[in-house]
Amino acid sequence: MMIRLKLLAGGEGSSDRVVPPSGAPAILTIASAAAMAFLAVFALALSLAAGRLAERWSEALSQGATVRISAPTGEMEAKTARVLAILAETPGIASARALEPSEMQALIAPWFGPDLPVDSLPIPQLVEIAEEGQGFDAEGLRLRLSAEVPEAVIDDHQGWRRPLVAAAGRLRLLGFLSIVLIGGTMAAMVTLAARSALAANGQVIRVLRLVGARDTFIVRAFVRRFTLRAVVGALAGTLAGMAAVALLPAASQAGGFLTGLGFSGAGWLTPLAIPALTAIVAFVATRAAAFRSLREVQ
């Protein structure tokens, strides 16, 4: 009776003694939480970067169009002038200009190199269109060009925009799916560690029951200890992941997506939610594992 009163009077503090303060379960919990949180930071950065990329591509491609003119060299200048005149009369077009040879060479340089002689090759003339307001009637302009300048073909970037935006959206979904899988893996590892600790302390649990300790008292000890371990590991992994992301190259026009993998502004606060989510996952997983294991201990 004296042992029972002393145990119950100790409250929350003495219940922690049920859980071993060190050993393989503790190391497994902290290490797995740190590793999963580290990976979650990169998955989150990937997802946010994909979202920014989708918005940037969609905005850039929706605000412009091009006209491609394929004509003999002797007729190219007249055809280009006629196309520019038509575009100047079209509502919804803010401006239109023919690209210089140097600009067209820069466009194809990534595929053919910078020394390609553009002037000596039958490369179509490109006319860049800048839209305004609600944009222009692409189908109406396409019909007029086909009637007056059959050599001119308009590209309003719809064919390019849809697959690019869809790909970026799927990449963002993949990032969120990775976070869910990481959370599930973390829950499995914490559950394994908690069940291992409970199995190793089966004799202690039997003694506690003999002196009157309720299962909720024992479960509370495991939940609190393992949740704290998981949060400590997740916090360390999150900070390490944020430091690694900060060391990645900054976003640039040349690097595109690969150099834009990171956080910006208030987005740096987003990874700090990972330890809090880890606490919830660890709490639920440990509590379920503890009650399940206690039912097996006779």
Image (cartoon, rainbow, N blue to C red):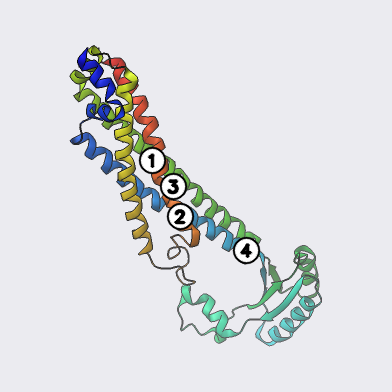
Q: Residue at x 44, y 55 (%)?
A: 45
Where is residue 104 shown, x and y percent of the image?
57, 80
Query: Image quadrant of residue 228?
Result: top left
Q: Amino acid at mark 1?
A: Thr
Q: What residue sits right under mark 1 in the picture?
A: 278
Residue 59 bears which disc, if any? Answer: 4
Alpha carbons under labels 1 and 2: distance apart:
16 Å
Q: Amino acid at mark 3?
A: Ala
Q: Sequence-wise, which precedes: disc 3 or disc 4?
A: 4
Task: Report crowding for label 3: few under 14, some 14 to 19, many 20 or more residues within 10 A (C-alpha).
Answer: few
Any part of residue 46 in sight: no
Q: What residue sits right under mark 3 in the picture?
A: 273
Q: Sequence-wise, which precedes: disc 2 or disc 4?
A: 4
Label 2 or label 4, whichever lies nearer to me, is: 2
Task: Report crowding for label 2: few under 14, some 14 to 19, many 20 or more residues within 10 A (C-alpha).
Answer: few
Q: Residue at x 66, y 64 (%)?
A: 62
Alpha carbons under labels 3 and 2: distance apart:
8 Å
Where is residue 26 shown, x and y percent of the image?
23, 37
Say which of 224 and 267 sits in front.
224
Q: What residue sits right under mark 2 in the picture?
A: 269
